[in-house]
Image (cartoon, coloured by chain):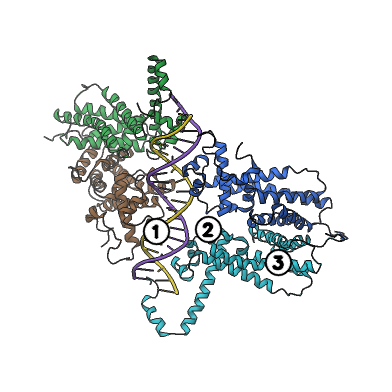
Chain colours: A cyan, B blue, C brown, D green, E purple, F yellow
DNA sequence: AATGAATGAGACTTCATTCAT
DNA sequence: GATGAATGAAGTCTCATTCAT
């Protein structure tokens, strides 16, 4: 029975259980927010951000539209949270790589492998790769870009280190990172889990192709 | 001198209007259509397809909204024409490459160079690379994908030929093409003409990085 | 007290709005939908379906345009509901006639009387008679026609029964029903409640004129 | 003479060929107008007045849209001309009936037969019966109704005469005419030339059914 | 006599968001 | 915490009509 679920009761509820209730509520908040962005990420990837309406999102979550606005300020904030989760996901996975796994090239290769895997198999990761942040307001965009830049910086640092230790040919680290990350991001565009290519397969092949070009050429001074 | 032909000048031309160009009310289906898609391509790239309203497009062209519908059946048709022009542009440039310029690898390298150049410097070309065709109705999408596939097929054929003549290492041609084309397409995403990186510079670097990984490894029997 | 039930009062009721009727923001899907189709029926009859814009309808109801779309999927659905209500109205009234009120002719006469009364005095009934269902999409049209056919079938059945029991002259039941129903439907076109002719008067006269022609001719073998 | 008609060329034309040309032009004008309203009537009957766009009409006639405005002031005028032609058609056919063909009933029967035939077989006639004149502006509507009234008046006169000479039962001539004409007009709504019922068949049956009810009841002193 | 091109007005519909409960 | 109901703004598109030639 609702005109709202618990109108009469609610007013009493927060008087009755002061502390625990709050924690539980907070926990609930977190859980709900997670559920929202998870579903949202899925829909954004399936139909695009613009074409995913708040109505659809609410319907999928089996909650009412205003409920979404209880958890998030607006649609944009949901997307931003997707990005944030995606970037966290990526950093999580990449951060786990041991920082002393050989020379720069070796570490770059692992990095590429891992990044490709995340982008292909994790939905939040795919959001980062796929959804154009130009959909965001300029303020939110700046925030997201700051986060994204960290990943790019990692790539660039690895390349630079590889060049320093001789395991990577002399090249423009910025362009090299862009090429590598771009190819992987783009894969997020066309990869379909239902297709015949396996993520591992793609990740492996991309690692070879994309890092192979950075190998120092034998006997060449370039 | 039509807006549609003079490509070198074109970079500034999206502001030009054939409306009232020479004398008033010249004949001009062709001319006008060209002007529309040129401006549309520009706006699509700037704000995205969905967020570019027909109103905005009309305003930019300094014509009324219904006038657009005199030249195109609907918004989708405009996007399709952008794609078509872009693909023609790409094929034009790639087709000009002499088909006997050395072995597979050599030809692939030229191809990459040229493709990157088009995608970075021609607006229609960028449309092909950047605008998600999932915005289209399924019918139009099929048409566009058929066209796009031809370009992908070219890449794949070059790789296959390179493998055959030994100039390219044994690899999955499909994945190799995807990696290469993807990296370039992605560049369309972040490249800003106003930035510090020159298109030629990027194209050159990408050529090295992306094809380098396909070189047969010295001393490897594979 | 719902707008939808009190038919006697209803003739003036198309101005009533359940919006803010009792207290503010009562529950009321049903109530509101009824109010919408009641007002819609009135406007459709006054200006025609095509020329009745959703804007006008909303204005009359003193709600915003999108609110209409909260209650109905689209304009067509509103018309379909008008039809449905009208047909229900007609069937209600006709169904109340006792099925054993004499021979076929006697029952037909009652039926004509009642049908004419509904078509002349009930707005939903008039919708069924007057609004061309070719305005509908082919799918909706099929649905409406199925409903309409039931009424036509009733007429035809009565005529057939009358022929069987000798109370009606031998004739083509289909054409007879069409003639009778047509004359009545057409009356919906020109009848104005504000005119000098009373509905009862018209219904009575039509009954005589339209069924008189079906009387078996004395001493004539047809 | 409207602004739209003969501005540029006319200035020279009427100096050069003063008489013949004018006649020819007038003849052409007539012919073209006829062609327009003929096609228009067809389309109006097929899709309805509102849904028949001037574009479609022009396309069907293989002329340009502005050309229509050369021959007619606006869409409404085209409909009015359809009505006018239809009414002329009806009057033509009805006027041909000899005014001394027996008593009132006999003449009424012929009249019904003829009216039904025209409404079912002539497109202009069908326009009069079918197209709701509420589509017209109030001014045009008045004109059309004046014309229509003449037909109605004929019906009513025949009934009155029939009552006078005893061949028709005492009844309200107005309602009798409405019933008769209404049934026939309505037939224009559902009759499809491609269907199985022949116009003659329908006309004959309607004549019997609709006039039968007006026969004076045997043995009744009224 | 005829037309290619253009337009103002307005149609239906969708969406992100908020109000009042 | 949650929701049924509502809305302002905007979107795509169509139409009758007219301008300039």
Rounded to the nearest angstrom, the CA distance separating label 3 from label 1 is 50 Å
Are dots 3 and 1 on a single chain? no
Nearer-the-camera pick, A216 or C27: A216
The picture places residue C214, in percent across and down from the top left corner, at: 25, 37
Residue mark closest to the camera, 3 vs 1:
3
The answer to whether the residue labelled 3 contacts the one labelled 2, judged by CB atoms less than 8 Å apart, is no
| Label 3: chain letter | A
| Label 1: chain letter | C
Q: Which quadrant of the view contains residue D35?
A: top left
Nearer-the-camera pick, E7 or C151: E7
The picture places residue C197, in percent across and down from the top left corner, at: 18, 42
The picture places residue B66, in percent across and down from the top left corner, at: 47, 42
Q: Is residue D163 visible?
A: yes
Please tell me which of labels 3 and 2 falls first in the chain.
2
Q: Which quadrant of the view contains residue D203?
A: top left
Residue at the spot of label 1: C70
What secondary structure is found at the residue carrying circle 2?
loop
Residue mark closest to the camera, 3 vs 2:
3
What secondary structure is found at the residue carrying circle 1?
helix
Residue at the spot of label 2: A50
What secondary structure is found at the residue carrying circle 3?
helix
The answer to whether the residue labelled 3 contacts the one labelled 1, judged by CB atoms less than 8 Å apart, is no
Label 2 neighbour load within 10 Å: few <14, some 14-19, many 20+: few
| Quadrant of image for the N terminus of chain A | bottom left
Residue at the spot of label 3: A155
């Amino acid at each position: 029975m609702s005109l709202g679920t618990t109108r009469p009761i609610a007013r009493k509820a927060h008087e009755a259980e002061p502390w625990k209730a709050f924690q539980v509520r907070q926990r609930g908040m977190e859980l709900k927010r997670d559920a929202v962005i998870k579903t949202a990420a899925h829909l954004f990837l399936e139909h695009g951000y613009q074409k995913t309406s708040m109505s659809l999102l609410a319907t999928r979550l089996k909650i009412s539209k205003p409920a979404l606005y209880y958890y998030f300020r607006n649609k944009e904030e949901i997307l931003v949270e997707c990005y944030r989760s995606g970037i966290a996901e990526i950093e999580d996975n990449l951060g786990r790589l041991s920082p002393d796994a050989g020379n720069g090239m070796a570490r770059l290769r692992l990095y590429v492998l891992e990044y490709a895997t995340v982008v292909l198999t994790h939905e939040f990761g795919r959001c980062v790769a796929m959804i154009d942040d130009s959909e965001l307001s300029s303020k939110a965009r700046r925030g997201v870009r700051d986060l994204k830049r960290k990943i790019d910086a990692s790539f660039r640092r690895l390349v630079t280190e590889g060049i320093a230790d001789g395991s990577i040919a002399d090249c423009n680290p910025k362009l090299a990172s862009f090429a590598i990350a771009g190819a992987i991001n783009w894969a997020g565009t066309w990869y379909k889990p239902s297709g015949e290519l396996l993520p591992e397969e793609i990740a492996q092949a991309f690692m070879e192709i994309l890092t192979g070009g950075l190998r120092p050429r034998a006997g060449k001074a370039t």
